Amino acid sequence: MSIAHRETEISVLIGHEPPEASAAAVLAWYPDIEVVTMRSYCNRDGVVLLLVTSNAVKTAQVLKAAGFRCQVNPVVLIGPLNRSGWASPIGVELTNAGIEVLYSYTSHIDRDRHYLVFKTSDDDSAIQVLTTGSSFQSLANNDSQPEQWMAIAEGSSSVQQTHSPMPN
């Protein structure tokens, strides 16, 4: 399996749910749902928890049943990687291919399992670029020091990273 593939991200708006349990505590009751990535940020509506799990449909159903407001979005998941430091160079690779990075983040399951999540203007094209590009294949085949990627990133403009607000 390629280390870059399409996944479903669940955005959970925190703050409007019943006070009995957190989203993570609710998911802990379901051992068949593995949390692959988790990240949070704040927007005008409150705190948003971003999750990629082993079963997005069930995750969204469980959280909605518990009173959470959820939204699902397709994203590009890259990983697991053995080292960090790849997000910026991969963002540059996508930008150079004409694909806008809407937002991205990293998630670390443990010290040696890093995941990257990218939401782009064209996720299918992003996966195509990432799975066929020679630079990315170098990463996939030899997850080692990212010096060559960093040199590419330093010579390019930075990638704007933003989070899309959840609809009301």
Image: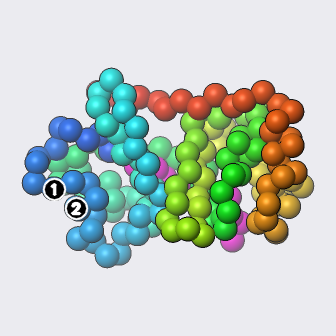
Q: Earlier in the sequence, mark 2 or mark 1?
A: 1
What span is colored magenta in the figure? 1-10
- The amino acid type of the residue labelled 2 equals Val
Q: Secondary structure at mark 2?
A: helix
Residue 56, labelled with which disc? none
- The amino acid type of the residue labelled 1 equals Ala
Position of the N terminus by quadrant: bottom right
Residue 17: say if magenta.
no
Give the residue pinned by disc 1.
21
Q: Secondary structure at mark 1?
A: loop
Q: Pick whichever, 81 or 167, lies toward us.
A: 81
Q: CA distance from mark 2 to mark 1?
A: 6 Å
Residue at the extreme bottom: 31
Q: Are marks 2 and 1 in contact (CB under 8 Å)?
A: yes
Give the residue pinned by disc 2.
26
91 vs 74, left or right, is right
Position of the C terminus by quadrant: top left
